[in-house]
Image (spheres, helix red, strand yellow):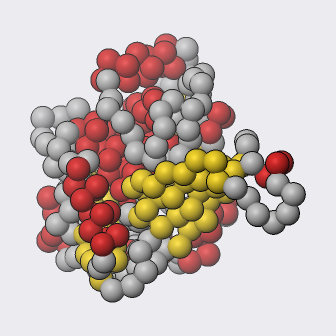
Amino acid sequence: MNATPVRVAVFGDVMIDYSVEINSRSARDEKRAVTTSNRSLGGSGANAAAAVTRICGPASADLFATVSDDSWGEWIVDRVRSLDIGVEHVRRIAGAVPHAVIVHDGSDRSVLVDRGVADDVVVPPAAVLAQYQVVYVSNPVACLTPLVVPAGSSVVAGVEHQMVDGLDATALARVDLVVTNAAGWDSLRYRGIHVPVVVTDGARGVTVYRPDDTAHHVAAHDVGVRDATGAGDAFAGALCAYLAGGLDLTIAVGRANAIASIAVTTTGAQLGPVDPELVDRRYRQIHESGDTP
């Protein structure tokens, strides 16, 4: 990576994750007893920004988001700040707190999302974004159309399948790179995307599809999955961090793939502390196997 300090702007959700565990098999009616519960920070924007600061250190990521102007909004902002993420551009407005209820029922998991005020994001002028090498947008429907970035900054969009219908050609034309999953790629592949698309697919690994119809696959790491919550966000944040640091796309994808393999072995939506030597070892493991260039 180059010597210039990494700076990544992250536009995206920041919310409360309320996780509960239930056991439907023991229920005799519509009631489900909660066996354990936990409240924590979540949201694709916060999770991605946390990955950047874990890799590159404090002040390497600023979050552009909207939360509710109440005690829960204050709770969210305090926890974002504790992750060394810049909160100067987190707005607090009247409205419902963004939150998700994550229900674990044996091997099944359901995520119920109430976006609240999350999509009421104010996109700043291009001059504000001039300090960032990469602008990551995980809520592209709300942000891409008004987004203007100066020359020298790259725009990376995280696109989920349910977002595709809300993105027109004008919005997609503002993007330099798309990150999606297999379901998102099924919806995007026929939209005439003219930039590289990075597709994550869990245990199947990651594939980079380029506009010239070439594809490059990176195998997944064989690790025990403890909690996959936020792993895709950790991958996207890590990818942006490495790109902002000047790495080539294929190398950045390989290293982000290593980060994701670390993320799934810990609990919680945010990436924990990162051991650079472990990242290097895992990157080399796949690199030396011939699955990356």
Q: Is residue 253 in sight in this rendering?
A: no
Residue visible at 63% across and 42% down? 201
x, y percent for residue 176: 39, 58
x, y percent for residue 152: 21, 57
Of residues 111 and 11, the one drawn nearer to the viewer in this rendering = 111
**So how many labels did they put on this image?**
0
x, y percent for residue 101: 57, 62
Residue 274 lies left or right of residue 171; in this view the side is left
Residue 19 lies left or right of residue 249; in this view the side is right
Residue lying farthest to the bottom in this orientation = 94
Residue 121 lies left or right of residue 132; in this view the side is right
Of residues 145 and 110, the one drawn nearer to the viewer in this rendering = 110
Q: Is residue 161 in sight in this rendering?
A: yes
x, y percent for residue 36: 58, 47
Instruction: Using the rendered view, name the quadrant where residue 42 is placed.
Output: bottom left
Check the image and report above or below for 80 versus 204: below
Residue lying farthest to the right in this orientation = 28
Of residues 51 and 256, the one drawn nearer to the viewer in this rendering = 51
Residue visible at 23% across and 32% down? 1
Residue 172 lies left or right of residue 149; in this view the side is right
Residue visible at 17% across and 66% down? 88
Instruction: Using the rendered view, name the quadrant where residue 254 is placed.
Output: top left
Residue visible at 52% across and 34% down? 264
